[in-house]
Amino acid sequence: MKNLVLLLLFSLSSAVLFSCSERQGESELSVTNSPKGSLVIIGGGSRPESMIDRMIVESGIQDSGYAIVLTMSGFDPDTSAFYGERQFRDAGISNIRSYDFERRDSFSQAASDSLTNASLIYITGGSQSRFMDSITENPAIAEALENAYRDGAMISGTSAGAAVMSKIMITGDQRNYPDYTSTYYNLEKNNMITAEGLGLITNVIIDQHFVKRARNNRLLTAILDYPNHTGIGIDESTAIFVKEGKAEVIGESQVLVYKNIGQIISAYEEKIGGMNLRLDIYLPGDMFEL
């Protein structure tokens, strides 16, 4: 009997040790696969000095490394490069340069290495579709961005540069209304046009200029069309600083987060409906889990 008890205790302790070891292995695996870098996703408009200073400190470029500005979203590469670089140069950062692949610069191995080894990469505003078209022409650009983010770089973008961060990217276009408007005036099924973004942040759909341009209908449509995704609407002069699965609001205004908790979608003719939707409004300094 005594031997049987000892055998049972040994078996139980072995099972516990194996279970703990297995969980530890899973934990180590998830940490290993997590990007070491950070994202600063800006809702457009002006960038406050405090936001630029935070980016400089968190990326470490005031001490070492360098920054790169990508202008493929911009309508004019030179103008986008000038203003994209100036915000950092005005803050005392000189180790910065810009690229506009396809239109101005060829994507060489040297350019790929520059992106991969950068400490901070900033994507300007303009047209997110134009930016992703340049990625389609040369997928190695996206690979270099992913490698930089994985290895510890900060990837930042404003307006269009924010929209490209998620895998599902809002283009701003509508199937039912060919003329562009800055927001949606209706909540309709089969209306939103999306495209593939960089996918640096997953299970999330980003919208920008959010409060300023009253884009609630657009993001509501997104979470009804993609009920397993969280919609994040970032206002102007505001950003989320994303690191290790958490987001912190920085800047001057609000971030609105929509979740389709119920994932119950209904429709009446062309109109779309949903139940048990959740909205949280975050202010500068607030943090939330992704």
Image (cartoon, grey):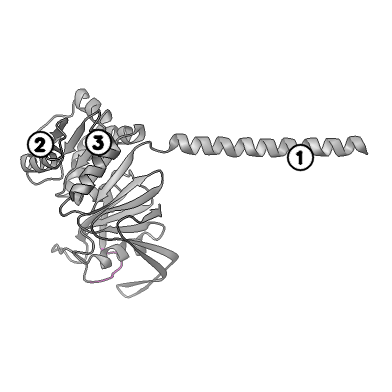
Assess whether residue 14 is covered by the magenta stretch. no
Residue 265 in the image, given as x and y percentages of width and height: 40, 68
Instruction: Point out the stretch of residues depicted in magenta.
Output: 186-191
Secondary structure state at the residue bearing disc 1: helix
Instruction: Give the mark nearest the N terminus, 3 or 2.
Output: 2
Dominant secondary structure (helix, strand or loop) of the stretch shown in magenta: loop
Q: Which label lies toward us, 2 or 1?
A: 1
Give the side of residue 17 with respect to residue 264, left or right: right
Instruction: Tell me the number on the disc at residue 120.
Output: 3
Q: How much space separates mark 2 and mark 1, taking CA atoms?
A: 65 Å
Q: Which residue is mark 2?
A: 103
Residue 23 in the image, given as x and y percentages of width and height: 59, 39
Q: Amino acid at mark 2?
A: Arg
Q: Residue at x 34, y 51 (%)?
A: 248
Q: Which label lies toward us, 3 or 2?
A: 3
Q: Nearer the viewer, residue 8 or 218?
A: 8
Q: Which residue is mark 1?
A: 12
Badge 3 local density, few (<14 within 10 Å), some, or many (20+)? Answer: many
Q: Is residue 161 visible?
A: no
Q: Which label lies toward us, 3 or 1?
A: 3
Q: How many marks?
A: 3
Q: Quarter of the image holding residue 12?
A: top right
Assess whether residue 189 is covered by the magenta stretch. yes
Are the residues at dot 2 and dot 1 in contact (C-beta closer than 8 Å)?
Answer: no
Q: Is residue 39 above or below residue 107?
A: below
